[in-house]
Image (tube, helix red, strand yellow):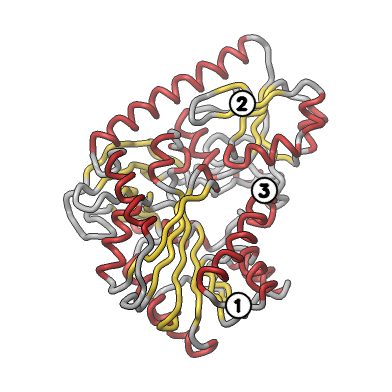
Amino acid sequence: MKQDIRVVTECRTCKSAKIKEFLSLGSTPLANSLVAKSELEKPEEVFPLNVVFCPKCGLVQLGHVVKPEKMFTNYLYLTSYSSTMVKHLGEFAKEVAKISGYKNGLVVDIGSNDGTFLASFKKIGFDVLGVEPAKNISKTTNEKGIRTENVFFNIENSKNILEKYGKARIITGTNVFAHVDDLDGLVEGVKILLDDTGFFIIESPYLPDLLHKIEFDTIYHEHLSYLSLKPLVVFFKRHGMKVIDVKRTKIHGGSIRLYVKKKPEKTKPKKSIERLLLYEKKNGINSFKTFREFARKVVALKKELISLLGKLKNDGKTIAGYGASAKGNTLLNYTGIGTETIGFIVDKNPLKQGLYAPGSRIEIFSPEKLVLDRPDYVLLLAWNFKEEIIKQQQEYASLGGNFITPVPWPKIL
């Protein structure tokens, strides 16, 4: 296992060696490593899940890095199974076209998953290319007409893509920038492939939202960095690029979207950057004290959730979970909640059905099981899609079913 994990000794964005740990969620299995029935008797690999802070630039990141091949070669999360994400990415593509001024040319999406984002660009009139390391996903995406290279994005592969497809006007990375260990290599690869007038656009969960809403379960081994604006401004400046616009979005419990220019000399940054940097300063996002307080809140939330579910079980109530999500598996493993409390988990994604959650070993079924079994309560493990799930499960609710959200504080809805 030692060769599969690396201890972080310096900040990923500014290279400072003065990083400080503030939270440990224990040693857990990889959050998306769902278990087949035939593997239930085998021990699971676990890896440390702790979080560190860089006092110099403010980046928050994991203290250990697991080899990406262990997490992304075969991947079961599919964007298209969430109507919320499909709508969000459709609107995102239209915004990119408006802000960039482009209506055609090559768009490259790094970590393109099942091509949902690229399909939106294709409708507008762009030529599209996905870069997706998961073999199972890239195969089906190519089959449905979204051209996809089955590789990790790095300098070498960027050169290969440039030779095959030419320069890109737009390169995107939604919920992928924070997954990458070698950010220097990623951005240098972007600079190779991107047209001089082009845009690099990223969207990732926003650190202040994670802190304020106690979204500790969004911390797992795939998410190496937890992003705020200040360290990103410092990072891109080091690479001769500039953040020219930034906005906050509601997706995934609160995210940040950045527009970055390769050749920024003639581009004046928007006032949104200055406003958000000031917001981060006022809210203590650059202070280690803020993160120590967050760690105390995480411990308190854990105790409250265990207490709430324990009381329901003592009253004879039955409980299921909705969403075999990575965040749900972080929550279950950190709290130690397992089959003694949660009878089963449901998920819309058929690739996950029939498997078991890592660590907790709770079996995963289709959502139809909620109506068939009628558990008294459903714990929303995929709480970031709360509205979508509740809307889908009106029949279950009409039969007396209730929902519980774990963050920002355990609550029966």
Q: Which residue is found at the position 59% from the left and 36% from the top? A: 381
Left or right: where does residue 155 sit relative to residue 320?
left
> In x, y percent, where is residue 310?
56, 16
Q: Secondary structure at mark 3?
A: loop
Q: Nearer the viewer, mark 2 or mark 1?
A: 1
Residue 404 circle label: 2
Mark 1 neighbour class, 10 Å CA radius: few under 14, some 14 to 19, many 20 or more: some
Query: Which residue position holds label 3?
Result: 352
> In x, y percent, where is residue 224?
38, 53
Left or right: where does residue 244 sit relative to residue 20?
right
Q: Secondary structure at mark 2?
A: strand
Query: Which residue position holds label 1?
Result: 103
Q: Nearer the viewer, mark 2 or mark 3?
A: 2
Q: Which residue is found at the position 74% from the left and 37% from the top? A: 391
Question: Which amino acid, by three-letter code, is at mark 3?
Answer: Lys
Q: Earlier in the sequence, mark 2 or mark 3?
A: 3
Q: Which residue is found at the position 70% from the left and 72% from the top? A: 123
C-alpha distance separating marks 2 and 3: 22 Å
